[in-house]
Image: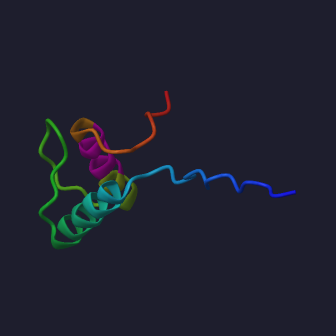
Amino acid sequence: MATKKAAKKSTRKYGASAGEHVKTEMHEMKRGKLKSGRSGKKVTSRKQAIAIGLSEERKNGAKVPKKKS
C-alpha cells in the first residue's frame, strides 16, 4: 500500500516582499524620514510604520491579508 504524500500547503499569511517592504519602512521611521498620509506628520509609532508598509504592499498586489474592519 503506497500512500501519496500531499504537497505541503503554504500557511504563510504574508509574502516575502511584504516583509521586506515593512523592514524598509521601519528603517525610515527610525531615521525620522517616515511621514504619515495627508498630514505629513512624522511617524513615531512602530505599529503605524508596520501598517504603512503593509498598506503600500497591498496596493502593489503583494500577498497580504485584507484589512480588518
| Number of disc labels | 0
Residue found at the very far top of the displayed protein:
69
How far across and down, in percent of the image, does residue 34 sit? 16, 58
Question: Is 54 included in the stretch rendered in magenta?
Answer: yes
Residues drawn in magenta: 51-58
Horizontally, is 22 left or right of 28 in the view?
right
Q: Residue at x 29, y 57 (%)?
A: 17
Question: Is 59 included in the stretch rendered in magenta?
Answer: no
Residue found at the very far right of the displayed protein:
1
Task: Give the color scheme: rainbow, by chain, secondary structure or one colour.
Answer: rainbow
On the image, which quarter does residue 31 sit in?
Answer: bottom left
In the rendered image, the vertical position of residue 62 relative to residue 32, given as above or below: above
On the image, which quarter does residue 26 sit in?
Answer: bottom left
Front-most of residues 4 and 6: 4
How far across and down, in percent of the image, does residue 11 sit? 57, 52
On the image, which quarter does residue 64 sit in?
Answer: top left
How far across and down, in percent of the image, does residue 9 sit? 59, 50
Q: Residue at x 23, y 56 (%)?
A: 43
Residue found at the very far front of the displayed protein:
1
- Quarter that holds the N terminus: bottom right
In the rendered image, the vertical position of residue 67 relative to residue 49, given as above or below: above
Front-most of residues 38 and 56: 56
* Magenta highlight: main SS: helix
Horizontally, is 10 left or right of 56 in the view?
right
Q: Residue at x 17, y 40 (%)?
A: 37
Front-most of residues 57 and 10: 10
